[in-house]
Amino acid sequence: MKPNASLDVIAGYFPHLTPAQRERFAALLPLYEAWNARINVLSRKETPEQWGIRHVLHSLAIARFITFKPGAAIMDLGTGGGFPGIPLAIMFPETSFYLVDSIGKKIKVVQAVAEALALSNVRAEQKRAEEVSERFDFVVSRAVAPLPELHGWIRNKVKPVSQHALPNGLICLKGGDLAAELAPFGRRVQVQPVADYFSDEFFETKQIVYLQI
């Protein structure tokens, strides 16, 4: 993989990146390669180029769905190795991101990556959803749990007053047949195919699910 292959893909979809954003995206995968050799946070069956598509670009689908405003507060629930939170924090440097996961070794990696990239808009803590007492404009998550379960965890953690055109709520990255888990929410839920944004075949079955809280 050439050094900036991942950056080239990202910049192709997001041509207005600042120099600081380009620098951080270019540094992102080398950081994860180094950490993944010590702590398995990304699949070792995938190549770094696949990581760029399946983790970084996938996370950035949310940045095509919504533009987070400066000063907004976003929680990434079950962030794992930092996805979608870290790529979104690079994309929205004036938005605050709070990344939580119940697994300490993963949060250790997230904290180290955020520090190495000088992401002052990122906080990361080892916590379960029920231990979080703050409220946020949006909660984002990637394939952590079925939507009804996620809703139960975060329904009291979303601010009642919206500052975005899209009402505050939950934004999830999901795949597969979602009919059963979406059914309880009726018109409160909106589904956006990621393939409308990105052409790689990996995204053909991927969806953004937005639930108004």
Image (spheres, rainbow, N blue to C red):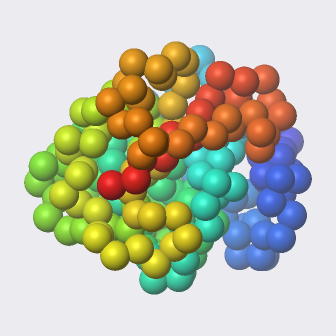
Rendering coords of residue 58 (x, y %): 63, 41
Please tell me whether residue 164 is drawn above or below residue 184 in the rendered image: below
Q: Is residue 177 visible?
A: yes
Rendering coords of residue 185 (x, y %): 36, 37
Q: Residue at x 45, y 42 (%)?
A: 187
Viewer-nearest residue: 96 or 72: 72
Say which quarter of the image contains residue 117: bottom right
Viewer-nearest residue: 170 or 213: 213
Q: Quadrant of the N terminus?
A: top right
Q: Residue at x 80, y 60 (%)?
A: 14
In the image, taking residue 130 as reference, residue 159 lies left or right, namely right
Please tell me whether residue 185 is drawn above or below residue 72 in the rendered image: above
Q: Residue at x 51, y 57 (%)?
A: 86
Viewer-nearest residue: 106 or 37: 106
Please tell me whether residue 62 is drawn above or below residue 74 in the rendered image: above
Name the residue at the front extreme. 187
Q: Quadrant of the C terminus?
A: bottom left
Q: Residue at x 39, y 40 (%)?
A: 80
Rendering coords of residue 68 (x, y %): 55, 70
Say which quarter of the image contains residue 11: bottom right
In the image, taking residue 86 as reference, residue 101 lies left or right, namely left
